[in-house]
Image (cartoon, rainbow, N blue to C red):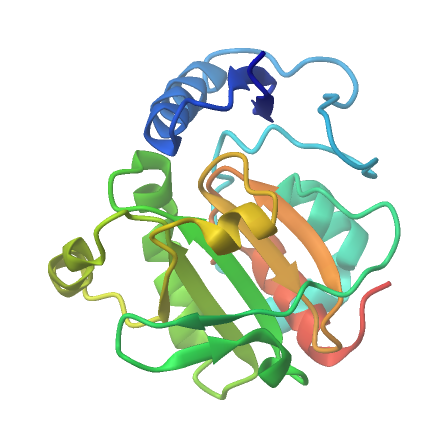
């Protein structure tokens, strides 16, 4: 009997690789842009959550001040706009140490006092590539060090990363998880998946699928995570 995993409303056999899941995610991404959203929240296996968004379309970014939007939106409204999953109860994100493509290491517990985005992706994943320019813009906006980003690559061969990162001029830290040990530890069922952690190390929200990480709602949520602990 095969175990199953759930992603974006589909039940997939566990022996299917993430490459297949990424293709299906891309198909769902395209289809969802021409379909009406279902009434009510979407149910999925796993721990209870406050709300599950489809995570299929990228809301347009806006030009207004991130600080003003952070004050105006609030955490709950930003989470709703981004269609994020909130944990049913506050919990610390599991600590980990991972090697980086540049030769350094990234340890989650060493980031206390900073907001953290942990993004799981691969070079062959089209939805992952779609959101990365916005991630880079968000990273460059926070050169003050109050936001840490680590994009954890699950590519089986890390040698594909230097030419890819060089071609696109991405400068955020990239972690190496070729055997998917960290991805499995975090229960990643599909990519891209992004985990948002506040300055106290508490897991704030999860995004399944690509997001426009440089829009007003994203900036508002990141600003709140930097300024205070989110409960």
- Can you give x and y, in whole percent of width and height, for residue 207 in the image? 59, 44
Q: Is residue 221 above or below residue 50?
A: below
Q: In the visual, does 202 lie left or right of 208?
A: right
Quadrant containing the C terminus in the rendered view = bottom right
Residue at horizontal 77%, vertical 58%? 75
Identify the residue at image location x=30%, y=35%.
126
Q: Is residue 65 visible?
A: no
Q: Quadrant of residue 177?
A: bottom left
Left or right side of 180 for 169: left
Residue most toward the front?
1
**Is 87 in front, or is 56?**
87
Residue at image coords 38%, 72% = 99
Q: Is residue 226 above or below residue 179?
A: below
The quadrant where residue 93 appears: bottom right
Q: Viewed as shown, does residue 181 lie left or right of 206?
A: left
Tag count in the figure? 0
Say if residue 60 shows up in the picture.
Answer: yes
Q: Position of residue 21 (x, y in %)?
A: 41, 26
Q: Foreground: 63 or 155?
A: 155
């Amino acid at each position: 009997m095969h175990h199953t995993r759930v992603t974006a409303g589909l039940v997939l056999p566990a022996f299917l690789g993430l490459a297949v899941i990424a293709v299906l995610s891309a198909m769902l991404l395209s289809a969802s842009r021409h379909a009406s959203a279902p009434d009510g929240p979407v149910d999925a296996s796993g721990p209870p959550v406050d709300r599950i968004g489809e995570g299929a379309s990228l809301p347009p970014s806006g030009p207004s001040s991130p600080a003003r939007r952070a004050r105006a939106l609030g955490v709950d409204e930003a989470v709703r706009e981004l269609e994020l999953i909130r944990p049913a109860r506050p919990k610390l994100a599991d600590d980990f140490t991972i090697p980086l493509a540049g030769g350094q290491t990234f340890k989650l517990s060493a980031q206390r006092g900073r907001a953290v985005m942990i993004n799981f992706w691969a070079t062959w994943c089209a939805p992952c590539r779609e959101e990365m320019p916005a991630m880079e813009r968000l990273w460059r906006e926070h050169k003050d060090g109050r936001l840490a980003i680590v994009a954890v690559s699950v590519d089986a061969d890390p040698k594909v990363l230097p030419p890819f990162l060089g071609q696109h001029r991405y400068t955020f830290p990239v972690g190496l998880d070729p055997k998917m040990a960290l991805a499995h530890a975090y229960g990643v069922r599909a990519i891209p998946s992004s985990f948002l952690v506040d300055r106290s190390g508490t897991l704030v929200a999860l995004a399944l699928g690509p997001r426009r990480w440089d829009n007003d709602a994203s900036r508002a949520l990141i600003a709140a995570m930097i300024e205070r602990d989110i409960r």
